[in-house]
Image (cartoon, helix red, strand yellow):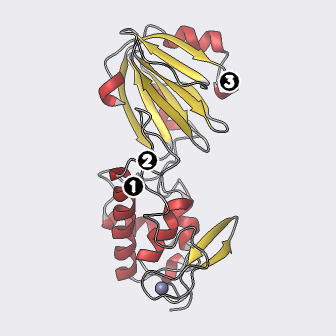
């Protein structure tokens, strides 16, 4: 996105689902048309698009969205809800799977904006070091899976990835954070990095698309135990189990990931 949209001016915007906005569409349109895109970064699920007017566009795709780039002579996707056209007639469309947020905020209000102010470290960011990870776990109550899913701790690890992340580190999802040994936290840190890097390398999950509309390649072929109940564990052949962990499901190898250690 940085390569395709930064430095360009927004010439037109369409929003078919105005409920995703934090202001009436006319006001939104007036505020962003003519403005130059200064930068695009992500923190967890949130995309921060900084505009020349000292405003920031915050986009959160909810369950997911296809954001697809177009050039002036490209055929647009059949279905989309949001369209940004830039001054050189390129741009991008967004098809939202379920719901989304598209909020325009003053840059100086960003730090107090409640939906994004408390986002934790981004696991692919420079600040995510093993020491910072250890520190973030210090004195935390609750179990490790709940910790990993909470965007206030780490922004951007979804339930899909957590299964193999915990399996690689040989940690049961319901282990209390306080019970984790240093070597386990280090293994978990390495596993977070390796699972996410592998998915990024393959362009994301198989049901996701990149900015050019290419499908990701990370799916059942890459998963070790995730979504494979009844199959043998790739390490020890024990049957993989599906268990309930709070409001989410977990997949575990009961031999490799014992609850009591
Ligand atoms: Zn096993």
Q: Residue at x 45, y 88 (%)?
A: 236
Q: Nearer the viewer, residue 129 or 163?
A: 163
User: Would you name the residue on which mark 1 appears?
Assistant: 199
> Percent from the top left, x then y, of residue 91?
43, 19
Tag 3 and tag 1, C-beta contact below 8 Å: no
Q: CA distance from mark 3 to mark 1?
A: 30 Å
Tell whether circle 1 marks a residue whose Cβ is less than 8 angstroms from ligand 1: no
Decide if residue 258 is in sight here. Answer: yes
Q: Earlier in the sequence, mark 2 or mark 3?
A: 3
Tag 2 and tag 3, C-beta contact below 8 Å: no
Tag 1 and tag 2, C-beta contact below 8 Å: yes
Q: Earlier in the sequence, mark 3 or mark 1?
A: 3
Q: Residues within 10 Å of mark 2 (few under 14, many from 20)?
A: some
> Percent from the top left, x then y, of residue 96?
61, 34
Which residue in the rendered view is the most extreme toward the bottom? 261
Residue 97 position by quadrant: top right
User: Would you name the residue on which mark 2 appears?
Assistant: 216
Q: Quadrant of the N terminus?
A: top left
Q: On residue 17, which mark appears?
A: 3
Q: Residue at x 54, y 65 (%)?
A: 147
Residue 164 lies, with reference to residue 26, above or below; the image says below
Nearer the viewer's eye, disc 3 or disc 1?
1
**SS category of the residue bearing label 3:** loop
**SS category of the residue bearing label 1:** helix
Q: CA distance from mark 1 to mark 2?
A: 8 Å
Decide if residue 138 is in sight here. Answer: no
Residue 109 lies, with reference to residue 228, above or below; the image says above
> Percent from the top left, x then y, of residue 74?
43, 18
Nearer the viewer's eye, disc 1 or disc 2?
2
Residue 72 lies, with reference to residue 158, above or below; the image says above
Q: On residue 54, which mark appears?
A: none
């Amino acid at each position: 996105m940085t390569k395709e949209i930064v430095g360009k001016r927004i010439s037109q915007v369409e929003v078919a689902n105005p409920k995703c906005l934090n202001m009436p569409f006319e006001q939104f349109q007036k505020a962003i048309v003519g403005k130059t895109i200064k930068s695009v970064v992500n923190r967890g699920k949130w995309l921060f698009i900084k505009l020349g007017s000292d405003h920031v566009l915050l986009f959160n795709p909810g369950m997911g969205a296809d954001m697809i780039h177009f050039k002036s002579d490209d055929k647009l996707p059949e279905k989309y809800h949001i369209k940004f056209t830039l001054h050189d007639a390129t741009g991008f469309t967004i098809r939202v799977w379920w719901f989304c947020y598209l909020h325009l905020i003053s840059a100086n209000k960003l730090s107090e904006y409640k939906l994004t102010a408390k986002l934790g470290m981004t696991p692919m960011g420079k600040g995510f070091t093993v020491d910072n990870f250890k520190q973030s776990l210090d004195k935390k109550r609750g179990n490790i899976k709940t910790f990993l899913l909470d965007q206030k701790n780490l922004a951007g690890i979804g339930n899909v990835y957590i299964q193999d992340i915990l399996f690689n580190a040989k940690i049961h999802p319901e282990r209390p954070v306080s019970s984790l040994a240093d070597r386990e936290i280090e293994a978990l840190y390495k596993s977070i990095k390796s699972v996410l890097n592998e998915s990024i390398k393959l362009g994301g999950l198989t049901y996701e698309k990149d900015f050019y509309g290419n499908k990701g390649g990370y799916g059942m072929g890459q998963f070790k135990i995730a979504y494979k109940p009844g199959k043998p564990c790739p390490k020890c052949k024990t049957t993989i189990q599906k268990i309930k962990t709070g409001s989410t499901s977990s997949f575990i190898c009961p031999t490799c990931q014992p609850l009591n250690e």
